[in-house]
Image: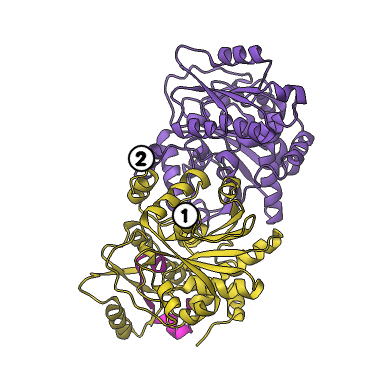
Chain colours: A purple, B yellow
Amino acid sequence: MSVTFADVEAAAVRLKGWAVETPLIESPALNDRIGGRVLLKAETLQRVGAFKFRGAYNRLVQLTPDQRARGVVAFSSGNHAQGVALAAKLLGIAATIVMPKDAPVVKVEATRGYGAEVRFYDRLTESREAIAAEIAQGRGSVIVPAFDDPHVIAGQGTAGLELARQAEALGVRLDVVAVPVSGGGLISGVALAVKALSPSTVIVGAEPEGFDDAARSLAAGERVVLKPATRTLCDALESPAPGEITFPIMQRTVGAMAAVSDTEVAAAMRYAFATLKLVVEPGGAAALAALLAGKVAVPAGGTVCVVLSGGNVDPDLFARAIRGEI
Amino acid sequence: MSVTFADVEAAAVRLKGWAVETPLIESPALNDRIGGRVLLKAETLQRVGAFKFRGAYNRLVQLTPDQRARGVVAFSSGNHAQGVALAAKLLGIAATIVMPKDAPVVKVEATRGYGAEVRFYDRLTESREAIAAEIAQGRGSVIVPAFDDPHVIAGQGTAGLELARQAEALGVRLDVVAVPVSGGGLISGVALAVKALSPSTVIVGAEPEGFDDAARSLAAGERVVLKPATRTLCDALESPAPGEITFPIMQRTVGAMAAVSDTEVAAAMRYAFATLKLVVEPGGAAALAALLAGKVAVPAGGTVCVVLSGGNVDPDLFARAIRGEI
């Protein structure tokens, strides 16, 4: 089962008027610092504060009336939960979200705020897949995967379609597009769209150090499953392996990967606060962190689009980041 | 000495390629809350993090070579300081800025970062006007007023020209434009542009409680000078009176004024952080605060553009605001 550029284009038609066409933001100060032109695709300004609404809506809007009546189930540490919850609300579908007990409070509250039922689980002793499967079986509900689903990937890809067209409207040829990576739903969708419209653009993925399953998988030529020994500030980027559907797309389209430390991520959040005036969550800042840390190769005077993929962050964590306490 | 719409149009030509054309940002969540359509003119994304760059650049770029050689002087608690400092740097002009000793650290550091010399003064015992005049006299420098200057007003007006044209491009007729008010440079410039292009749009100004000199002046039909008995969170909105040039423009163009409390301003900053994912400083959030507090009359289903005029805020203050400690 694969995903094509045509699927992304079809998703864009479905999302029109539902998803926000997020702006490409440019900062002269950031351009000066990088020595090139940086365009920020601010998915922080998307509905639910993250790109995840795109994929969730594209999946849910294609359910049959019968499927809609039986509700949907998803498991997620946060942004996918909110994306599914809001898409379900807009479509009149009941949603149950399985979330870890230690998910950021702001994400749990937002998910409930969209009317979804939240079922907590313990990361150490329970399987979220098993819990979701049990709920889905009981009600005949569809499970909405966070990334390894063609409709979800095509939906996320609309962010790439938008940024490519927005760059073209500015008369800009993109040398590089840099994207945070967890299971690969966003980067594979974005890469499908960008590569179709601009084949020479290099796609760069950014992962947290210790959670570099995508980089290792791409190097090995097969999906590597990590058993992370550490935690990361990037709660949104903790997937242990690329997906079965996302990985082959990444193999065809991703040019380079970068790993960023918690310190680099916090510095990027602080930079976004102080200079860009944007609220970015840790995982959402991974690609910006890689760029600021010099880990994204941009030709001198070249142009890079950085996807800021989400902005849902607890106030306490944000306060620590902007005060330089991380 | 007055200012016309043609002056704003001429300023826009001078600023093209120098000022950022800041986006109009829309949030479905905010639309739902207000029960209408809200377009946010994000001057937080302007160079120096506030609209002030527009007016400063429009003033400085019109200096003669001889005036440029003798440098400029300005006094400001912060954003005007940064605007003048950056415009001077870009034009190769030496700048001296007279700032209060208790100005936000972030604004002082940024002003120095643009290469300006900072001269501190004590709000209680010294006159910033006298200090600036002394420096200017010694060097033959031009003093760049923060608001009461035709070129400064015309420059700030380009934000209004942009938002009116951007709204038109979206096919939107603006019922209301809401703007933070201190000395009136921004609101008078914006009103000149918006009223020229859309005469029926109502211009609403927002001031801090206790610093409502513009509202009192408009009510009295003459400039009222306040001796504020309190402080305000909005360090950017502490002017004691409207300007001699700005006030007559405000009399002709401003439809209503609103006063907001520190609590309402902090709530707006928190809302901007949590829902809009935007960093807004207290004064920059005054019009949003008025809207969220129900102090801006918007027709049901109507459209309002809110100017977020600046985002330069110390991390400690921002942390307290988003944690609900103010």
The residue sitting at the bottom extreme is B1
B303 and A19: which is toward the camera: B303
In the rendered structure, the answer to whether residue B95 lies left or right of residue A241 reads left
Q: Is residue B64 magenta?
A: yes
Do marks 2 and 1 both belong to one polypeptide chain? no
Residue A12: name its quadrant. top right
Q: Is residue B44 magenta?
A: no
Q: Which residue is mark 2?
A: A320
Residue A190: name its quadrant. top right
Q: Is residue A301 visible?
A: no
Percent across and percent down for residue A8 are 74, 36
Q: What range is drawn magenta here? A: B57-82
A29 and B300: which is toward the camera: B300
A323 and B33: which is toward the camera: B33
In the rendered structure, the answer to whether residue A204 lies left or right of residue B241 reads right
Q: Which residue is mark 1?
A: B293
Mark 2 element type: helix
Please tell me which residue is depicted at 34% across the width and 46% down the height of the picture. Answer: B320
Number of dots carrying numbers: 2
**Label 1: chain letter:** B
Mark 1 element type: loop
Q: Amino acid at mark 2?
A: Arg
A19 and B142: which is toward the camera: A19
Work out whether A125 lies above or below A59: above
Percent across and percent down for residue B255 are 54, 71
Q: Count residues near mark 1 (Cα–Cα under 10 Å), then give few for <14, some for 14-19, many for 20+.
A: some
Q: Is residue A30 visible?
A: yes
Residue A268: name its quadrant. top left
